Amino acid sequence: MDEKTRDDLLKLFQSKLNEAMRFYLETCSRCGICTEACHAYQSMGQVRYISAYRHEIVRRIYKKYFKGQGKALPAWGESKELTEMALEELSAAAYSCTGCRRCMVYCPHGIDTQMLMSIAKLLLVGAGTEPEILSMLADTSIEKGKSLELYKEGFLTGIKNLEAQVVEKWKVEAGRTPIPVDVEGADLLYVALAGAHSIVPAAAVFNAAGENWTLSFFEAVNFGAFVGDPTRTKLILERIINEAKRLKVKEVCICECGTAFRVMKQQSGKQPFKVSSITEVQARYLWEGRIRVEKDKFPGPVTYHDPCQLARNAGVIDEPRYILNQLTSRFVDMTDDVRYNWCCGGGGGLVALGEDTLDFRMKSVTVKVDQVKKTGAKILATACENCHTQLSDLNAHYQMGVDVKFLSSLVADALIH
Ligand code: SF4
Ligand code: SF4
């Protein structure tokens, strides 16, 4: 690696060094408590998947270039030179970590592996060695924000084609549009993912609740966050913030995408609208009696996988359970304490990397498979696209015998007048 590249990368490293990050980098006491916290280590037994091992790579580079001891006495300070090989190690550490933060719950100092891996990911972006597909997807999202007019017509035609499916689930009053788009003064802006599964059930529930809502032109997913690029994360976020402000909505509701919700909730700053997840909104409708659902419409015990970005990392824990207890008298929780729940193994961009990560995704979460099997559930509900894909892959690979369902689709299918 030439000097200029290294200097540029170290500037990126420095841009991440706020007070919290320095604390995470300087505090690990090597107590080993986090050893068994990571699903990848628990499932595969390889030292490189221990969370403290992952951050040690980042920490040693930090010691080398940002701490006096590492600069003066590299060997003693356990410092590490930033080289191509170090980048490869950072890549292996960061792209086998889902950012689930289970290890953080165990660590007595609350060291946040996801944050430390965000340094690794940023260095990879700076060196141009991040996964190309994630970068391309992030760029496409940003481009769509810049040239919305080009996409508008095709988008509106696609949405029109979904209307009949929405009406099948819930009939709207004459004169009302089943999927309103671009409505200024709507109370709620719904930000979905591409595809009927993310739009149709949600639309039916909004209509059943009599919500004054409108659908966003943009997809909720933030590939900038997956690839660990703060600049692109912000640009992708801003498309939605600007749309919400233009339409003067009071609430932005993010679909079943854990990362999209966490990023919107925690990184959009102070805005004239509140941010909710679709799970919170649907629980509220049930609580307020704005919608009703038929109990026990679905057969067998039902369990729920808490998406890490929604539950452990953003606190949406009671709402899905409230919904499920309205839907079934046979809800079986898979954990006594959601903070310690196992990750599905698909986050952090791993599912988006598709076949490239499939083998690792299957091997690294046998603990999750065991957890699901123990519930004896017939239906495995979840509220995140990534989790749904990963759990469906696990279901097929390990023949778990469950029906993997989106929570919002269970609500929509059980709606009653
Ligand atoms: S954040 Fe999750 S995946 Fe990453 S090291 Fe910690 S437990 Fe493992
Ligand atoms: S639990 Fe925390 S302090 Fe202990 S080894 Fe792991 S990261 Fe370091």
Image (tube, rainbow, N blue to C red):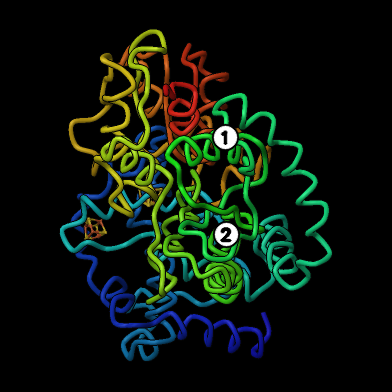
Percent of width and height locating residue 270: 37, 77
Asked whether 400 or 313 is in front, the reply is: 313
Pick the front one: 270 or 39: 270
Q: Which of marks 1 and 2 is nearer the N terminus?
A: 1
Instruction: Give me the residue at 52% from left, 39% from top.
Output: 202
Task: Give the CA separation, mark 1 to mark 2.
Answer: 32 Å
* Residue identified by numbered label 2: 222
Left or right position of 350 against 288 = right
Tell me the mark number nearer the camera, choosing from 1 and 2: 1
The relative height of residue 82 versus residue 93 in the rendered view (above or below) is below
In the structure shown, which secondary structural element does the residue marked by tag 2 occupy?
A: loop
In this rendering, would 374 be left or right of 57? left
Residue 30: x %, y % from top left: 22, 60
Q: Which mark is residue 172?
A: 1
Q: Are marks 1 and 2 in contact (CB under 8 Å)?
A: no
Which quadrant of the rendered structure holds the N terminus?
bottom right
**Does any portion of residue 197 appear in the rendered image?**
yes
> Residue 153 is drawn in which quadrant?
bottom right
Query: Tag 1's secondary structure?
Result: loop
Residue lying furthest front: 174
Q: In this view, does 219 lie above or below 229?
A: above
Measured as percent of width and height from the top left, residue 310 is found at 37, 48
As drawn, is 315 to the left or to the right of 128? left
Q: Residue at the location (52% across, 57% down)?
A: 189
Q: Residue drawn at (37%, 80%), measured in percent from left and top?
A: 63
